[in-house]
Image (cartoon, coloured by chain):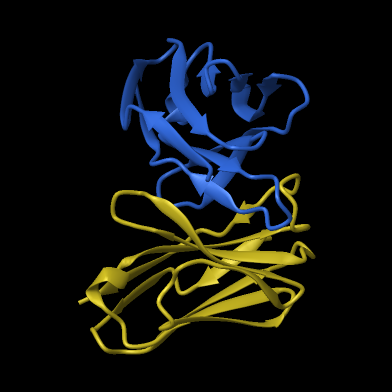
Chain colours: A yellow, B blue
Amino acid sequence: DTAVSQTPKYLVTQMGNDKSIKCEQNLGHDTMYWYKQDSKKFLKIMFSYNNKELIINETVPNRFSPKSPDKAHLNLHINSLELGDSAVYFCASSQGEGYNYEQYFGPGTRLTVT
Amino acid sequence: AQSVTQLGSHVSVSEGALVLLRCNYSSSVPPYLFWYVQYPNQGLQLLLKYTSAATLVKGINGFEAEFKKSETSFHLTKPSAHMSDAAEYFCAVSDGGATNKLIFGTGTLLAVQP
């Protein structure tokens, strides 16, 4: 029973393409997140949604657009992919918004842009 | 703004030896501090967290960390390393705000030698 799942696990694509990464959590959590981990393992938050509402939107190019069709899903769509988008993208979820709520991470999606 | 600095990107210990991973934080407000572990090709898992209760925090897998305000530190320790502890460890800080935004350090890769 995977708590936070992501598809696909690996994604290889060419520059200029549009791609999506899907995330689903079966924990009944209200809050979901997207993080980007670069080649040096640096992890940075991109977006956060609570009950389908955007609450964190870091300085991310507007080529990145999160979409939350329901509380259990938070998808990440990326337009016009660039080489610098190559990274591992992690989805996470937590029961609530506050610091006291543990974030549960998915296994990651390794995106390679050629 | 909050930040964390992890000293030592790579730490190598012998099996059975003490593990010490260093984390220093910077925060303009009382911080909430976390240690996460990332096993190869997996997502992050919470080891422990400090949320202004006891300064010595015990986590999973025998790890603990001590919050020292005077030293702005939150070092992670384990008395006796196991081979299974080999992983990447991330220190993170939250401003305790409503958004549960985590700021991660750059990670420390722990190697355990037989």
Q: Residue at x 45, y 74 (%)?
A: A8
- In terms of depth relative to the viewer, which is nearer, B35 or B59? B35
How far from the left and from the top, in percent, is residue B69? 61, 20
Nearest the viewer among A109 and B66 is: B66
Q: Residue furthest left?
A: A114
- Residue occupying the point 43% across, 68% down: A9
Q: Is residue A2 visible?
A: no
Q: Position of residue B52 (x, y in %)?
A: 74, 28
Q: Is residue A68 left or right of residue A29?
A: left
**Horizontal and vertical percent position of residue B61:** 61, 27
Q: Is residue A64 left or right of A56 when viewed as pictured?
A: left
Note whether A2 is above or below A62 in the view shown.
above
The residue sitting at 53% across, 23% down in the picture is B72
- B73 to the left or right of B59: left
Q: Is residue B95 above or below residue A16?
A: above
Q: Residue B92 occupies which quadrant of the picture?
A: top right
Instruction: Look at 78% across and 25% down and name the residue there.
Output: B53
The x and y percentages for residue A12 are 29, 76
Quadrant of res B94: top right
Q: Nearer the viewer, residue A42 or A13?
A: A42
Q: Quadrant of the C terminus of chain A?
A: bottom left
